[in-house]
Image (spheres, rainbow, N blue to C red):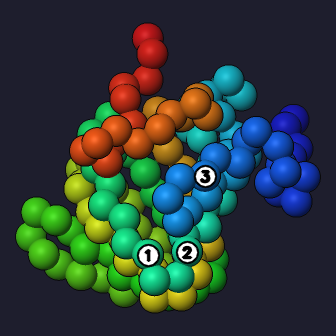
């Protein structure tokens, strides 16, 4: 069994920060679960374009409000507590935070914890 406390892990190297967001990676590839699990906080008023070409991601909004725009067709969806979205087609998207967003995220394949966003908004493919 794996048990981790977010309140402890947010003060360790499991917390990864980038421009105007941070992510506490509670499960990583090395845990052997087949997915990774993160709590991600997006700063109010920020905008982020991501394109996870090598990963699928599902996201559940715990708190805050924002929008997600599908870049291939311009559809915009409201994000608020209780809303889940899944990037099942490796969708390029723009996330806009009206207020601070706290999101629970799962990645498949799991991230290792060392990833950084590439110029196109993706993470590199998982090592084989």
Left or right: residue 113 compared with residue 27: left
- The residue that appears at 88% across and 44% down in the rendered structure is 3
Q: Relative to 76, does residue 52 appear above or below in the rendering?
A: above
Q: Residue at x 80, y 54 (%)?
A: 10
Estimate the spatial distance between the alpha carbons at disc 1 and disc 3, rounded to whole Å.
14 Å
Given contact means CB atoms under 8 Å apart, are the residues at marks 1 and 2 in contact?
yes
Label whose residue precedes the other's in the sequence (1 or 3): 3
Quadrant where the image shows the C terminus: top left
Which residue position holds label 2?
43
Residue 80 place in picture, x, y as percent? 50, 86
Q: Residues within 10 Å of mark 2 (few under 14, many from 20)?
A: some
Which quadrant of the figure contains the N terminus? top right
Which is more toward the observer, 109 or 14?
Answer: 14
What is the spatial separation of the Cα atoms under label 2 and label 3, in whole angstroms?
A: 11 Å
Counting from the top left corner in percent of width and height, residue 75 is at 17, 78
Q: Which residue is mark 1?
A: 46
Residue that mark 3 sits on:
17
For marks 1 and 2, give the CA distance: 6 Å
Camera-nearest residue between 17 and 51: 17
């Amino acid at each position: 069994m794996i048990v981790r406390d977010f309140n402890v892990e947010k003060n360790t190297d499991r917390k990864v920060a980038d421009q105007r967001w941070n992510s506490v990676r509670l499960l990583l590839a090395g845990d052997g679960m087949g997915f990774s699990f993160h709590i991600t906080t997006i700063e109010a008023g920020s905008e982020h374009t991501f394109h996870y070409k090598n990963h699928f991601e599902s996201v559940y909004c715990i708190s805050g409000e924002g929008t997600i725009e599908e870049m291939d067709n311009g559809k915009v969806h409201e994000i608020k507590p209780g809303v889940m979205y899944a990037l099942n087609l490796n969708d390029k998207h723009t996330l806009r935070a009206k207020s601070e967003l706290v999101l629970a995220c799962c990645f498949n394949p799991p991230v290792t914890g060392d990833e950084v966003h590439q110029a196109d908004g993706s993470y590199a493919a998982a090592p084989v």
